[in-house]
Amino acid sequence: MGSTFNKKEREKKKRQKKKAKAERREERREQETSGKLDDMIAYVDEYGNIVDSPPDRSGEEEIKAEDIVVGVPPKEEEDLSEDRQGKISYFNEDRGYGFINDQSGERYFVHVSELKEPVNEGDKVTFGVEKGPKGLVAINVELVQ
């Protein structure tokens, strides 16, 4: 007779919570083993649509791993021997360098040591090209008369 009504109510609520928790745990176990994973798998068809069925692999061609190129493809070798024509787009006499735009739109660095005669911005020139430390550079730059 030592227990009060409140104490009995609290113990009853604890038992109910424990029972409800055990029931929820059991439900989760049943759901995990009922094969729900197959219901969650989706596939993407050749048009980018999400579908339930796996793709048809009958029309696919075999691809060899060595045929796959990873990275940037090698750049085609340019013919560096021919003379080009262009226009001085920028030249700084104090620093001794500038840039030439050729007719195709490419831009080349030019150093004062490669000039046959003094140039100014806007002058038309002919020049050769060779590989430099940071790309192609103009060499043997001459003014066009």
Image (tube, rainbow, N blue to C red):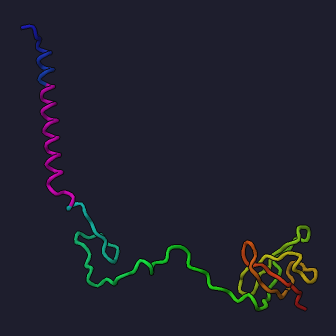
Residue at x 10% of width, y 11% of height: 3
Residue ranking furthest to the front = 66
Residue ranking furthest to the top = 2
Task: Please name whichever residue, 64 or 123, is drawn nearer the observer in this view of the structure.
Answer: 64
Quadrant of residue 128 in the image? bottom right
Main SS of the magenta part reads: helix
Residue at x 34% of width, y 82% of height: 62
Which segment did they paint magenta?
13-37
Residue at x 59% of width, y 80% of height: 74
35 in magenta? yes
Q: Please indicate whether residue 141 sits to the left or right of residue 3 in the image.
A: right
Residue 96 image position (x, y, % from top left): 88, 71
Image quadrant containing the N terminus: top left
Confirm whether residue 107 shows in the render. no
> Where 144 sits versus 74, above or below?
below
Residue ranking furthest to the right = 117
Quadrant of residue 104 in the image? bottom right
Quadrant of residue 93 in the image? bottom right
Residue at x 65% of width, y 86% of height: 77
Residue 124 image position (x, y, % from top left): 85, 86
Residue 19 image position (x, y, % from top left): 12, 33
Image quadrant containing the C terminus: bottom right
Q: Please indicate whether residue 121 sits to the left or right of residue 80 in the image.
A: right
Task: Please name whichever residue, 139 or 95, is drawn nearer the observer in this view of the structure.
Answer: 139
Task: Please name whichever residue, 113 or 96, is drawn nearer the observer in this view of the structure.
Answer: 113
